[in-house]
């Protein structure tokens, strides 16, 4: 039966449309990005509720990424061997349950445990979408598809900024997270109805085709220099999202640029809006010119300049800061090109394992830098305490934020070392 047959029932047309299938699966990615980035909006409440310092808060927030990083290799191997549909439905249901329990946690230990457990289920969110996209789209469309999948995640990141900040101010952080759980349950229903493992005309790998064992797939992934370079590039370019967007952006902007909490959350949200627009544009641009390496280099150069302007230009208005944040979100979207580069650099039967290595580096770097930003704050802290809580000066935040342009400069070097694939699929 042709996938374009007009006699197909409506439900079958939905489950055979590659955009609908992959973007519905990406609702999982959207939801997990809310969980990953929510601390930027609820961190004052976390400090007050659980009485934590900056480094403890960074560690608390990073519990999600610790879990994702630890389990992501296992996830990649399972996606190469088992039903993506079944795995993502199970992971999504688990995340909804863990998020609900996090919302009612009465101790720091309990909250950290369920934050960690949410991160385990979150290990599936992006890799599952990439594996599905590699089955449903030709290589020439893969960067655009990846860009739109990342756009879905950035919508989640956007919701975790000003909208969540306003919701927390209105109903409190616990009730806000419970409403977040209800949203997750609605997404789960949509995924159950639409997500399919393969298009009808897809030639599934047979046992003869899949030559590598579980550990053989992992060995192939870790032995590929291209996989490590792409993962590290994306990790460093992603720090504006994983560090500033997820945890520290509002605090930095309030302290250094003297924005109100609402102005800071709007400015931080612009990182995600920039990435929402930038990801499909960057993906389309890469596919259009038939190059992967060139956009990655261009993105790193411009991002470095914008980050230096943000740090070292005094007396910026809230509008100027929002524009810079938008620009950083847009231009660092070149990090999404790493995923098609990895797909085009490795055999199809190890796609999940190779993409999982990149995710291991990306999320592991994000977790370490979330924590390390807090460590740098505590290291530079001048001893000021208000209402029993540590208060950090603008110089403390500037000291910590300097790691962002340093990271972007390193990503430029990595982009120069990546091998060009010319948008061509891997050939044995």
Image (spheres, rainbow, N blue to C red):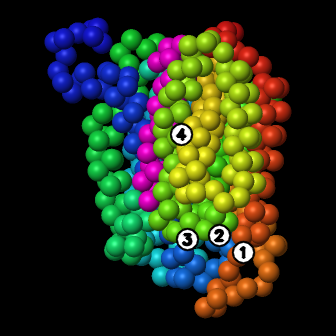
Q: Which residue is painted at 17% across and 21% down in the image?
A: 9
Foreground label between 3 and 4: 4
**Which of pointers 2 and 3 indicates the residue nearer the eye?**
2
Say if the magenta span includes residue 152: yes
Check disc 2 and report its element: helix, strand or loop: helix
Looking at the rendered image, the disc whose residue lies closer to the viewer, 1 or 3, is 1
- Marks 2 and 4: which is nearer the front? 2
Residue count near mark 2 (Cα–Cα under 10 Å), binned few <14, some 14–19, many ≥20: some
**Magenta-drawn segment:** 137-162
Which of the marked residues, 1 or 3, is nearer the chain's N terminus?
Answer: 3
Chain-order first, disc 2 or disc 3: 3
Pointer 1: what residue? 393
Left or right of 54 in this view: 375:
right
Residue located at (57% from left, 20% from top): 285
Helix, strand or loop at label 3? It is helix
Query: Residue lying furthest bottom in this view?
Result: 387
Q: Mark 2 vs mark 4: which is more N-terminal?
A: 2
Give the side of residue 37 with respect to residue 373, left or right.
left
Q: Residues within 10 Å of mark 1 (few under 14, many from 20)?
A: some
Q: Nearer the viewer, residue 359 or 288?
A: 288
Residue sitting nearer the eye, 50 or 171: 171
For the residues marked 2 and 3, what is the alpha-carbon distance in whole angstroms?
A: 15 Å
- Name the residue tied to disc 3: 43
- Disc 3 or 4, which lies upstream in sequence? 3
Q: Is most of the magenta stretch helix, strand or loop?
A: helix
């Amino acid at each position: 039966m042709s996938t374009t047959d007009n006699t197909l029932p409506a439900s079958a047309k939905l489950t055979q449309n590659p955009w609908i299938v992959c973007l519905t699966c990406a609702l999982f990615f959207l939801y997990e990005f809310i969980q990953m980035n929510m601390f930027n909006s609820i961190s004052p409440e976390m400090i007050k509720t659980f009485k934590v310092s900056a480094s403890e808060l960074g560690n608390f927030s990073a519990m999600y990424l610790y879990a994702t990083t630890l389990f992501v290799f296992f996830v990649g191997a399972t996606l190469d061997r088992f039903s993506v549909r079944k795995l993502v439905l199970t992971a999504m249901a688990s995340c909804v349950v863990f998020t609900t329990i996090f919302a009612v946690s009465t101790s720091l230990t309990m909250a950290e445990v369920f934050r960690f457990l949410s991160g385990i289920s979150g290990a599936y969110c992006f890799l599952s979408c990439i594996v599905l996209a590699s089955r449903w789209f030709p290589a020439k469309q893969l960067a655009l598809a990846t860009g739109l999948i990342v756009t879905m995640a950035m919508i989640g990141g956007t919701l975790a900024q000003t909208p969540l900040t306003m919701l927390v101010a209105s109903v409190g952080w616990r009730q806000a997270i419970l409403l977040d759980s209800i949203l997750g349950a609605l997404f789960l229903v949509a995924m159950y109805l639409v997500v399919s493992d393969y298009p009808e005309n897809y030639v599934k790998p047979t046992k003869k085709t899949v030559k590598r064992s579980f550990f053989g797939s992992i060995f192939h992934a870790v032995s590929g220099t291209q996989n490590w370079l792409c993962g590290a590039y994306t990790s460093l370019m992603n720090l504006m999202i994983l560090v500033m967007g997820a945890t520290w952006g509002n605090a930095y902007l309030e302290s250094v640029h003297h924005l109100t909490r609402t102005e800071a959350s709007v400015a931080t949200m612009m990182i995600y809006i920039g990435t929402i627009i930038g990801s499909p544009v960057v993906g389309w641009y890469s596919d259009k010119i038939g190059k992967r390496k060139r956009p990655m280099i261009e993105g790193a150069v411009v991002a470095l300049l914008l980050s230096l302007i943000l740090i070292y230009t005094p007396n910026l208005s809230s509008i100027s800061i929002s524009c810079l944040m938008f620009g950083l979100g847009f231009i660092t979207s070149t990090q999404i090109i790493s995923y098609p580069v990895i797909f085009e650099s490795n055999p199809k039967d190890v796609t999940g394992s190779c993409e999982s290595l990149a995710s291991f580096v990306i999320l592991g770097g994000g977790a370490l830098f979330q924590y390390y930003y807090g460590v740098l704050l505590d290291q530079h802290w001048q001893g000021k305490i208000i209402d029993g809580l540590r208060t950090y000066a603008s110089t403390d935040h500037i000291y910590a934020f300097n790691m962002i342009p340093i990271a972007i400069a390193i990503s430029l070097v990595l982009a120069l070392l990546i091998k060009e694939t010319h948008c061509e699929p891997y050939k044995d």
